Amino acid sequence: MAQYESSTFNIPFAQEKVYAKLEDLNNLEALKSRLPEDKVKEFAFDRDSVTADVPPVGKVTLRVVEREAPKCVKFAADNSPLPFNMWIQVIPNGEEASKMRVVVKAEVNFMLKGMIEKPLKNALEKIGEVLSKIPY
């Protein structure tokens, strides 16, 4: 398994508020307008899953497999050509602020590792950036 991590993003909201928003995926409605239409299509979600059509990968579903209040939401990929798990970590940064990081562990064979490392890291950065800018 290979592990990939985003940068750490500062969020001007308390850890509990950030977690409360992220643990219910229905709250992703606030993200729809921030997603680049050429990179993400057919964005749909419910409390426990989010599905997006991401060219050239195709339709991928992330399903919540664990909620660890107030610090982590863990996901497993369904319908993905590459099996992976993702989690969003939120840690306190004082009483009214927090930090967030997005992590992916993927089963990547040696041949694919070099090809997907940079695009995957860029995707994690974009996810972290978008999540850090929504109002909590």
Image (cartoon, rainbow, N blue to C red):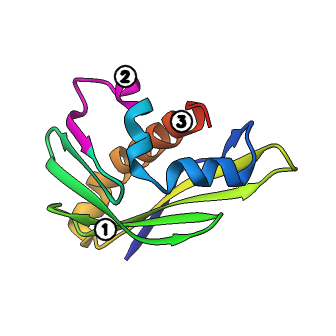
Q: Which residues are magenta?
A: 31-44
- Disc assigned to residue 21: none
Up-down: is 13 above or below 84?
above
Q: Which residue is mark 2?
A: 33
Secondary structure under the numbered disc 1 in the rendered image: strand
Q: Which residue is mark 3?
A: 129
Residue 117: quadrant of the picture: bottom left
**Residue 104 screen position, x and y as percent:** 42, 62
In front: label 2 or label 1: 2
Secondary structure under the numbered disc 3 in the rendered image: helix
Secondary structure under the numbered disc 2 in the rendered image: helix
- Left or right relative to 132: residue 119: left
Label 3: few (<14), some (14–19) or many (≥20) C-alpha neighbours in 10 Å? some
Amino acid under label 1? Phe
Residue 69: quadrant of the picture: bottom right
Ranked by sequence position, the earlier of labels 3 and 2 is: 2
- Disc assigned to residue 84: 1
